[in-house]
Image: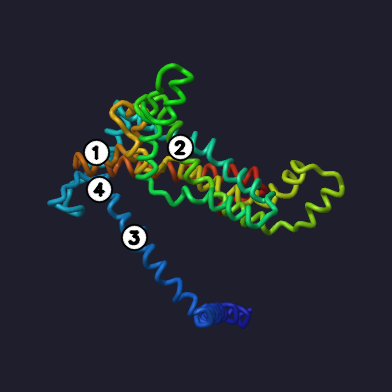
Amino acid sequence: MENSAETGTGSRPLHRKKAAGSRLGTFKKNGFLYLLLAPALLLTVIFKYVPMYGAVIAFKEFSPIRGILNSEWAGLKYFEKFLYSPNFEVIFMNTLKLSFYGLLFGFPVPILLALMLNQVRKAGAKKNIQLFLYAPNFVSVVVIAGMLFIFLSPTGPINAVATWIFGQPLMFMTDPAYFRWVYILSDIWATAGWASIIYVAALAGVDPELHNAASLDGASLLRRIWHIDLPTIKPIMAIVFILAAGGIMSIGFEKAYLLQTSMNLPSSEIIATYVYKVGLQSGDYSYSAAVGLFNSVINVILLLTVNFVVKKLNDNQGLY
């Protein structure tokens, strides 16, 4: 008994030495790969993790003169200020609606584009179509906003048609009722083609013999897409949906701010633009940091919730 006990206790350091030696051997074997990974890790730490310390100003009476460390603690004061402010419900719902409708109408479009592109058999035609679809992604947001103001102005080409049909121009850029649709449809036009690349790449791996066999068995095009193509891209769809739903509160600041006018503010004022105005324009740094941190916490909760639901519905396949 004593010998076995001694052997058992003595084997633990031996196992630890073996494990350490194994890790060291793995590091030596893949040292060059770790070296290639080092710059990316360093940049991630510097630009992603180190700035997280700045979030502490949401809990302080931050003063640029005193600095973060010397500023007095304020607790949850600024979170309560935002939650009980008269603007909270409008800003929160504007952000949620704009993101939710964008996900609802924008998520299926890249999938449909990829499925349609997969049916184009001529390589030359397929490349030209892809070039046409991908091009809007490389147009600057500022340029897109300028184009929208020109085309949707009361004297623009679209309102020329609207005036001929309805007898008067439609105030697309000033009426709050039109803002969400202008934002969402222009966003789909700009990003759907580029977002379809990942699905096109996945569909390229489908064995053509599966389609040929299904055709010989009498399966229609829709049946082949449903039973062959969609199951192939299903895992990718799940991951993309989780990431999109997890960032549902993080819609782009630039485009919303550029499309804002004094007339459409009831629909266009979102958390991102509100943080910019309160923080940089008004100089209320602690309050703006609290609003931004609140937005980030909501995103994390949504990400975890959506990932949990998708894993339950997708054979335990999710983001993690």
Name above or below for residue 290 compared with residue 236. Answer: above
Q: Is residue 276 visible?
A: yes
Mark 4, secondary structure of its residue: helix
**Quadrant of res 105:** top right
Quadrant in which residue 90 is drawn: top left
Quadrant of residue 48 within the rendered picture: bottom left
From the image, tell me which residue sits under label 1.
278
Label 3 vs 4, first from the N-terminus: 3
Q: Marks 4 and 1, Cα distance to the nearest angstrom? A: 14 Å
Is residue 13 visible to us here?
Answer: no
Q: How is the image coloured?
A: rainbow
Q: Secondary structure at mark 1?
A: helix
Which mark lies nearer to you, 2 or 3? 2
Q: Nearer the viewer, mark 4 or mark 1?
A: 1
Give the mark nearer the N terminus: 1 vs 3: 3
Closest to the observer, 20 or 161 = 161
Number of other residues with Cα within 10 Å of mark 4, as a class: few under 14, some 14 to 19, many 20 or more: many
Q: Say left or right for 240 vs 177.
A: right
Lower sequence index among marks 4 and 2: 4
- The answer to which of marks 2 and 3 sits earlier in the sequence is 3
Rendered residue at 36%/30% (across/down): 153
- Place of residue 5 in the rendered image (x, y in percent of width and height, measured from the top left): 59, 78
Q: Mark 2 sits on what residue?
A: 99
Q: Quadrant of the C terminus?
A: bottom right
